Image (tube, rainbow, N blue to C red):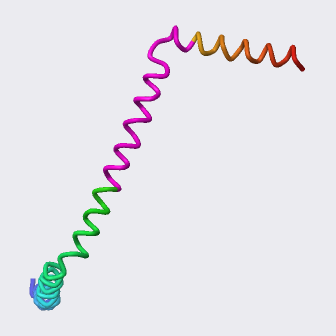
Amino acid sequence: MSKSEPPPNESHSSLPQSSNVQGPKQPDDDSSSSQSLSESSPPRDTSDDNASTAGSRCMLIQPSSFELESAFPSTEEIRDHCQQFGRVIQVARYEN
C-alpha cells in the first residue's frame, strides 16, 4: 500500500506539469486566432479555396454520373451502342 502511494504522487506531479504545458499553448492559440481575425483576408482566402475545391469536386462527381446515366439510360441503348460499335469494327475490317 505504502509503495503504491509514491507512483500516484509522481503521476500527480506530472499532471501539473502537463497542465502547465497546456496552459501556455492555449494562450498561444488564442493569440494566433486573434491575429488571424485581425488578418481577415488570408483566412478568408484559404476558406474560399477549400470551399471552391470541395464545390468543384462535387460538381465533377455529379456531371460525370449524370453523363453516364444519360449516355446509357437503358439496356436497349447499350445494345444499340454495342451493335453500332460492332458494325464499325466489321466495316473497318472489310476496308482493311
Q: Is residue 75 magenta?
A: yes
- Nearer-the-camera pick, 7 or 24: 24
The part of the chain drawn in magenta is 53-78
Q: Is residue 49 above or below residue 58?
A: below
Whether residue 7 is visible to the viewer of this picture, yes or no, is no
Q: Is residue 52 above or below residue 78?
A: below
* Residue positioned 18% across, 84% down in the render: 32
Residue 8 in the image: state x and y as whole percent.
12, 84
* Residue positioned 90% across, 20% down in the render: 96
Q: Quarter of the image containing the N terminus?
A: bottom left
Magenta: main secondary structure equals: helix
Q: Is residue 71 magenta?
A: yes
Q: In this rendering, would 56 be left or right of 88?
A: left
Q: Quadrant of residue 44?
A: bottom left
- Nearer-the-camera pick, 43 or 16: 43
Q: In this rendering, would 1 be left or right of 70?
A: left
